[in-house]
Amino acid sequence: MSVTKTPAWQALADHAAAARGRGFDTLFAADAARVTACRISVDGLRLAYAFQNVDAQTVGLLTALAAQQKVADWRAHMFAGGRINATENRAVLHTALRQRGDAPVLVDGVDIIPEMRAVQKRMAAFVDDVRSGQWRGATGKPMRHIVNIGIGGSDLGPRMAALALRPFVTGVDVHFVANVDAFDLNNVLDKIDAAQTLFVVASKTFTTQETLLNARSARQWLVEKLGEGAVKKHFVAVSVNAGEVEKFGIHADNMFPMWGWVGGRYSLWSAVGLSLALAIGNAHFRALLDGAAAMDDHFRTAPLEANMPVMMAMLGIWNRNFLGMPALAVLPYCERLRELPRYLQQLEMESNGKSVTRAGAPVQCDTTPALFGECGTVGQHSFHQWLHQGTTPVAADFIGVARDDLGKPEHHRALMSNMAAQMAALAFGQKRPAAPHDNYPGGRASSLILVDDLTPRALGMLLALYEHKVFVQGVVWDINSFDQPGVELGKRLAKGLESGSLAEGSGMEKTVLAGFYDAFLSGTA
Ligand code: F6P
């Protein structure tokens, strides 16, 4: 049965009819303790949702929906290695990568932990070798530049975390190449010295066109400078696909495996995090995993109504499905989190941008909202006009860092007061009937996610929070959050065009596409 036909959903729909009209003045007036009541804290990370259009009844109804959809059972199933990614027949075990002890996790009756620990050990030893200068390049010099070549989940996580954790980066510079547009690669090659550069080719499948093309061009660049023999000292790979890695010309000793049970957009915790670990060192990388493990523990054990990822997920469902908000703005008031919206775009929109249920029927409700974002205060001078006075109210996640260690307290005060001001302006607005252009409708919902300090541990907690939020929403919408079939058709069509043999398509689109390409694009190479 579609979730929209269930009693818990219907109860929320009835409740929303009344809730839609209420303003934040009413909500705050009704409960003097609202600010303190509407928050959940976990180990230095806080979620404050007083600026969401909810009261105790709404929270009760949302929790009932989560319970009805069996979030707790699905959660247990995921942690236990159940094949919840049914279309790909895979377990979903990014949580195992950060679990603290060696408690067995079984996939098809086989404990995956010993092999995983062995890879983590190899990875840590390699990180130490490179960072200590023991690992030398072909000309005998230590590594100064790490270049991660990957795209999507093999790029966005390490790229985002390397910036977020910049104060912890020591000894090397880390660069990222993702786009097949040669500008991206050239831009990095221009800045580095081949003799002191380690390329990390990260691709779960090792078949991704953009990554392989970039990696081949980087390899050619290196060989031209240092000779074929240098590849062994300057290229390593992260993948599940040992055969393709070897075909590419990277030795098996230089390959760090991952597994089918790690989804690309959930893979920062695996060897996909190698470039990050090389930049921040093993202790900080471990702290990142520990932070995620702390959030996993909370997610597994806290009751639904006091469970931070569950609450975030259900607030998102409330805004999307019952209050009709088509988008979520993610607004970190922290320059180091500048890449976070892009990372979350893949996490949320590739996971839950689906329109069929697990059983293959059309979903009867909207699924994930469009996610976009920008750092505050920069976004205030760009799209915040639309947030405040646009015709379509959307929700926002404000993300703040309480402690400032940058030595300029007046900047931090300005940052924090702007963030709080934006939340209040969106919520309460300003009624100016006599000057309509100056009227702010208010009633625009937001949450605040506050970390005490942006440490590796705190970042781990924050990312795991969003991962589990996405999981809960997928469960409630009854969709598979762990496949991404929608990206495949475009890949096949592009390959067909490039090779001049368009096999894809039933007829019309094949002819139109080839004609379009010939008319406008084929001569532009
Ligand atoms: O095209 C989408 C995608 O499959 C993502 O899910 C993935 O993170 C990205 O491509 C890169 O894939 P790979 O790591 O296999 O190169």
Image (spheres, rainbow, N blue to C red):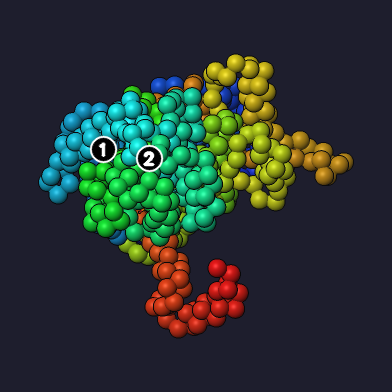
Question: What is the x, y in percent for residue 485?
Answer: 38, 62
Amino acid at circle 2: Leu
Relative placement, left or right, of 305 versus 286 is right
Please indicate whether residue 331 sits to the left or right of residue 130 in the image: right
Residue, x 20% and y 34% (percent of image)? 117
Rendered residue at 59%/22% (across/down): 32
Q: Which part of the image, by quadrant, shows the N terminus?
A: bottom left
At which x and y percent is residue 227?
A: 35, 49
**Residue at screen point 42% across, 69% down:** 495
Seen in the picture, residue 255 relative to 523 is either above or below; the reply is above
Callout 2 secondary element: strand
Q: Is mark 1 within 8 Å of ligand 1?
A: no
Tag 2 or tag 1, which sits nearer the N-term? 1
Task: Please tell me whether mark 1 or mark 2 is closer to you in this view.
Answer: 2
- Residue tagged by mark 1? 96
Return the residue nearer the eye: 93 or 507: 507
133 left or right of 459? Answer: left
Q: Can residue 73 be seen in this view?
A: no
